[in-house]
């Protein structure tokens, strides 16, 4: 299973293509992207799903565009489903982003699996930044959305955020194998080991090697 990264929109959201054996998913399309579409076509990838790690505008603004281009269903955690068409939740107006409304074709829950080319990603419910935030765990990596960044973590000061839930989600991510590569919603990739040593929000977590 491979991961290709594309920075989209003015917020530099990481839009990921996760693919294996001719099949792919597109994660967090923060806006229309001809570069992503060209990659999919060049690699001959069939898009099985569009997946949102959470429902904020900078991660979902390209949903409808990608659905129309690929015909793939949209997947999001059940707790963030209402964000898809509610500007008061997805914060599009505050972020000056146009967010065409979209509708989920499948609602995700903790422990669900997303199959790609005979392999699978496991859905980890990692709330805190939003109530329906998820991370996607692969064989040697995790897509952490806006829960964990290199050297930082997601904001918890939004109306639907919860600091205690975020702390629990960070602890859960911190227990992944140290060599696990972290692909965050913004910024460069990192590893669990690096964050345990250097991220001030994780360095206090004990008993994790």
Image: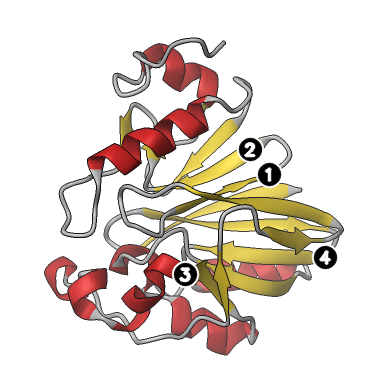
Of tags 2 and 3, which is closer to the observer?
Answer: 3
Assign a secondary structure to mark 3. Answer: helix
Where disc 1 sits, the SS reads: loop
Who is closer to the viewer here, 155 or 40? 155
Name the residue at 22% across, 79% down: 87
Q: Which residue is mark 3?
A: 78
Q: CA distance from mark 2 to mark 3?
A: 23 Å
Image coordinates of residue 129 in percent, x first then y, are: 30, 50
Residue 37, horizontal then vertical, whole percent: 59, 73
Label whose residue precedes the other's in the sequence (2 or 4)? 4
Between tags 3 and 1, which lies in front?
Answer: 3
Circle number at residue 138: 1
How far apart are the two marked residues, 3 and 1, measured between alpha carbons?
21 Å
Q: Is residue 104 above or below residue 110?
A: below
Residue depicted at 26% across the width and 81% down the height = 86
Instruction: Tell me if label 1 and label 4 are in contact, CB under 8 Å.
Output: no
Q: CA distance from mark 3 to mark 4?
A: 28 Å
Cα distance in 3D space between marks 1 and 4: 17 Å
Whether label 3 touches label 4, CB < 8 Å: no
Which mark is drawn over residue 22?
4
Mark 2, residues whose alpha carbon is within 10 Å: few (<14), some, or many (≥20)? many
Is disc 2 in contact with disc 1, using a CB cutoff of under 8 Å?
yes
Residue 203's mark?
A: none
Residue visible at 44% across and 29% down?
171
- Mark 3 Cα shell of 10 Å, populated few (<14), some (14-19), many (≥20): some
Q: Label 2, on which residue?
A: 141
Q: Nearer the viewer, residue 137 or 164?
A: 164
Q: Residue 132 at what x, y percent from top left?
A: 40, 60
Q: Indicate which disc, 3 or 1, sits on the residue closer to the N terminus.
A: 3
Which-is-in-front pick, marks 3 and 4? 3
Kindly check if marks 3 and 1 are in contact, taking CB atoms under 8 A apart as contact. no
């Amino acid at each position: 299973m491979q991961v290709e990264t594309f920075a989209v929109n003015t917020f530099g959201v990481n839009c990921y293509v996760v693919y294996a054996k001719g099949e792919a998913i597109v994660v967090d399309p923060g806006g229309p992207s001809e570069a992503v579409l060209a990659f999919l076509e060049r690699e001959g990838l069939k898009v099985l799903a569009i997946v949102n790690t959470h429902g904020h505008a900078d991660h979902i603004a390209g949903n409808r565009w990608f659905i129309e281009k690929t015909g793939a269903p949209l997947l999001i955690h059940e707790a963030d489903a209402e964000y898809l068409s509610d500007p008061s939740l997805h914060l599009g107006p505050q972020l000056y982003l146009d967010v065409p409304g979209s509708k989920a074709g499948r609602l995700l829950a903790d422990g669900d699996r997303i199959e790609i080319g005979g392999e699978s990603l496991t859905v980890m419910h990692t709330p805190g930044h939003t109530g329906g935030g998820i991370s996607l765990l692969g064989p040697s990596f995790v897509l952490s959305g806006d829960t964990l960044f290199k050297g930082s973590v997601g904001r918890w000061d939004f109306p639907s955020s919860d600091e205690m839930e975020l702390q629990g989600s960070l602890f859960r991510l911190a227990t992944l194998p140290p060599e696990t590569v972290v692909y965050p919603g913004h910024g460069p990739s990192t590893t669990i080991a690096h964050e345990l040593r250097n991220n001030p929000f994780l360095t206090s977590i004990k008993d994790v090697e």
